[in-house]
Amino acid sequence: MEPLNFPPGGTLVSVERAQQLILQGHCLCIAGAGHLLEQLPKGVWIAGSIPYFMAQRGGETNSEQLLITEIKHFLGVPKIAFYSAQEIQNIAKDAPENGFSIVIIPAGSSVHEEYARNAPNYEDMYMKPILGWVSGVHLDHLGKQLPSVANGDIGESSQRQAVVMHVELPPDYSAEINTTNLFTQGDGPVFQFPQAGFHASQCSVDNDKTVNLAEYIQQNNIDIRLPLVADYCGMLVNISIREVGESTVTFYAPVFDGVDYRFARPLDDYQSQFQQQLPANTDSIQFSCNCILNYVYCELENKDIAIKGPMTFGEIAYQLLNQTMVYLTVDNTLE
């Protein structure tokens, strides 16, 4: 089967075109509005609901087309399965020794919280490439519709389970996960939290006084478009703020106790800074996703970035990330 001539990260197509590609036997990762995913036939594909994309026309909101990413170079037929909150701990153990796994998780589900809290401790995690994204809905429909994922192998969707595609590669191919995070820690105070979770009230500032984080943000006019950033031995991990209530702050990913966080340094020009960090050669990129918060806060609608993909409610590069671009490269080690 001839590979599809899609740009790195995928391209937008009609439902009819997606149906044709599936029936032709192409292996696909698909993103699109939930009602479109329900129209797809069985095949070798997984999908998640989202209407925001970086596509051939640049950033756009689109509920009438699907973003298709072709998975190539696989050995045998990829294995596709649903994972519940109780089963997701096996994701790395089930992954192939040489290959990669793409996972899509519905936002706000119990499996989302389980993965966010505990993925770094799963057996074989960080030993095998695991990446993916968190599905969502149109921002106008938050609280009215539930995000979903779909398993093309059995032709079913779920709002409570994660879907995973385990892809084995030939011996002469290797996969690598890459991330692009423009945010760095600012010069402000250090925040520490007494316990892990998606919500926080009390926290310490500069290992000294205890404050209410929601009140602190409001009193100091902190721009909550900037995430909290933790430094894990040189890897910067963002924790984005979802909502600041009267006394509680809600995050898109959990904060952890014993970790130092600072609010990020502001960006001058997201688009140009992002382009500067992209790889010169994007030919080996098979899959990519970026964050809906980058799409909204950095006004990416109608702006173009070379690497295409869904704009998601969370990104996964082993663990759950926020406001980060994740992409997968697959290379022939003999070339």
Image (cartoon, rainbow, N blue to C red):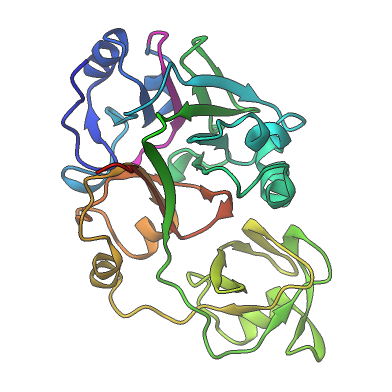
Give above or below for 327 relative to 16: below
In the rendered structure, the answer to whether residue 295 lies left or right of residue 265 reads left
Q: Residue at x 21, y 17 (%)?
A: 17
Q: Could you say where residue 266 lies in the image, as x and y percent from the top left?
A: 42, 80
The magenta segment: 41-52
In the rendered structure, the answer to whether residue 124 lies left or right of residue 10 reads right
Give the residue furthest to the front: 334
Q: Could you say where residue 186 lies in the image, as x and y percent from the top left?
A: 52, 85
Tally the marks: 0
Give above or below for 112 relative to 13: below
In the rendered structure, the answer to whether residue 268 lies left or right of residue 240 reads left
> Quadrant location of residue 240?
bottom right
Q: Is residue 243 magenta?
A: no
Q: Could you say where residue 136 lies in the image, as x and y percent from the top left?
A: 49, 39
> Quadrant location of residue 220?
bottom right
| Viewer-side residue, 199 vs 46 | 46
Q: Could you say where residue 267 lies in the image, as x and y percent from the top left?
A: 37, 78
Give above or below for 246 relative to 102: below
Q: Residue at x 65, y 41 (%)?
A: 112
Looking at the rendered image, the quarter that the N terminus falls into is top left
> Quadrant location of residue 213?
bottom right
Give above or below for 306 relative to 104: below
Q: Is residue 132 visible?
A: yes
| Viewer-side residue, 169 vs 213 | 169
Q: Is residue 45 magenta?
A: yes
Q: Residue at x 17, y 42 (%)?
A: 56
Q: Is residue 314 visible?
A: no
Looking at the rendered image, the quarter that the C terminus falls into is top left
Q: Residue at x 28, y 27 (%)?
A: 64
